[in-house]
Image: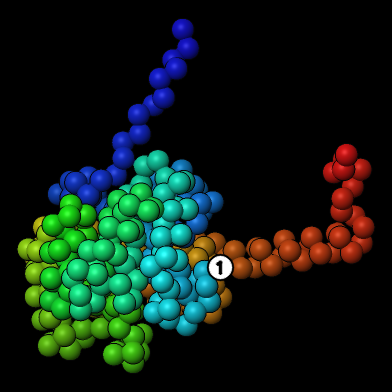
Amino acid sequence: MPNKVKKEIKKVTTHVLQEMKKAGEKISMLTAYDYTMAKILDAAGIDVMLVGDSASNVMAGNETTLPITLDQMIYHATSVVRAVDRALVVVDLPFGSYQGNSKEALNSAIRIMKESGAHAVKLEGGREVQESVERILSAGIPVMGHLGLTPQSIYKFGTYQVRAREKKEAERVLQDSDLLEKTGCFAIVLEKIPAKLAAQVTRNVSVPIIGIGAGAEVDGQVLVLHDMLGLNEEFSPRFLRRYLNLYDEIKNAVGSYIKDVKSRDFPNKKEQY
Ligand code: KIV
């Protein structure tokens, strides 16, 4: 008799991520902004998909992450959630939707969860967003923290250089990661900080630490999908490993298509009705 029972997929939850940290199993995370790519990432077995506000840069062509709106984030998140069977989907709270007003933070997080069907939200900052984190958690919404180079603060930093090289800022990262764990974040992203400091944070806290430009001694890695696929020629930080050169591949494919159309090679007899 054919087995009609669909194989049960073990979904990645915040609890699963914490178990992975305990077991020493590394967590894989990539950004996703649309249905088609999210479907491929899920089929490949990615653990976490981040609907990052980097959509502002890579999808919309803005210079920073600041312009993207809550409605736009919900649009991207909804498309990703439709594609996903297994991965945990985390959505960035965009700039201006949570800072300085915990009630607004809660409303923004509720809109993301209700309208997109995502599983968790991420926000940037430490002590300055503690009240917002607490309030979002009080509604049962899991929160991922983000420390180090927090791109929504780029005009405060003035540069995309490595953060927390100085003792004072390194201390702050240590204290804030401790605070975010105690407040109840289920995981924390550390962006572009010295590997030694990231390793220290990873040892100090019991929640998973996901690094981007934070070295190998963390619990998992995240990259921006378009960067690791080589879709973006201009962006080449030291931490980026390119797994494909899709910029050239796509450019060549489009060039071939143009040539075939102009030369009347496409469509041929088999490609028409
Ligand atoms: O928006 C984003 O892509 C991110 C990652 C860089 C962690 O926050």
- Percent across and percent down for residue 212 are 32, 69
Q: Mark 1 points at which residue?
A: 231
Q: Is mark 1 on a helix, strand or loop?
A: loop
- Image quadrant in which the C terminus is located: top right
Give the residue at x 22% y 49%. Answer: 14
| Residue 243 in the image: above or below residue 60 | above
Q: Which of 100 and 271 lies nearest the eye of the viewer? A: 100
- Percent across and percent down for residue 90 are 32, 57
Give the residue at x 85% y 59%. Answer: 260
**Looking at the rendering, which quadrant does residue 53 occupy?**
bottom left
Q: Does the image show residue 24?
A: no
**Could you tell whether 236 is left or right of 107 in the image?**
right
Give the residue at x 21% y 83%. Answer: 164
| Residue 129 in the image: above or below residue 49 | below
How did the renderer colour the structure?
rainbow
Please count the marks in the image. 1
Q: Residue furthest top?
A: 1
- Percent across and percent down for residue 100 are 20, 78
**Looking at the rendering, which quadrant does residue 154 occupy?**
bottom left
**Looking at the rendering, which quadrant does residue 69 occupy?**
bottom left
**Could you tell whether 121 is left or right of 249 in the image?**
left
- Mark 1: give few (<14), some (14-19) or many (20+) Cα within 10 Å: some
Kindly tell me whether mark 1's CB lies below 8 Å from ligand 1: no
Q: Does the image show residue 3?
A: yes
Q: Residue type at mark 1?
A: Leu
| Residue 154 in the image: above or below residue 53 | below
